[in-house]
Amino acid sequence: MHGGTNPGAPKGNRNAWKHGSRSAETIALLSCLREFSADAG
């Protein structure tokens, strides 16, 4: 069944890990920084 929808790698698949720029931890950190920046500016 080539060409069908692909859900991607299973959750927690360390073989699919590349650099972490989209990890939950990084996304949460960027969200906090944006919020802090909005309050400061």
Image: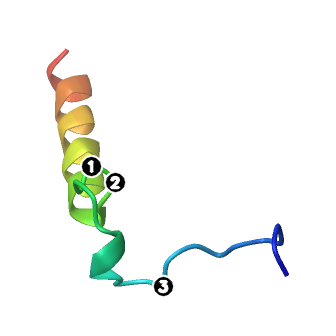
The amino acid type found where label 1 is placed reads: Ser
Lower sequence index among marks 3 and 2: 3
Tell me the residue at 22%/54% (across/down). 19
Tell me the residue at 19%/50% (across/down). 29
Residue at image mark 2: 22
User: Disc 1 to disc 2, how far (Cα)?
Assistant: 4 Å
Relative to 26, residue 6 above or below:
below
Residue 9 horizontal side relative to residue 17, left or right? right
Q: How is the image coloured?
A: rainbow
Tell me the residue at 79%/71% (across/down). 5
The amino acid type found where label 2 is placed reads: Arg
State which quadrant residue 8 falls in.
Answer: bottom right
The amino acid type found where label 3 is placed reads: Pro
* Near-viewer residue (31 or 41): 31
Residue reaching furthest to the front: 2
Residue at image mark 1: 21
Which secondary structure, mark 1? loop
Which secondary structure, mark 2? loop
Which numbered disc covers residue 10?
A: 3
Q: Position of residue 2 (x, y in %)?
A: 81, 74
Relative to 6, residue 28 above or below:
above
Residue 25 horizontal side relative to residue 15, left or right? left
User: Disc 3 to disc 2, how far (Cα)?
Assistant: 15 Å
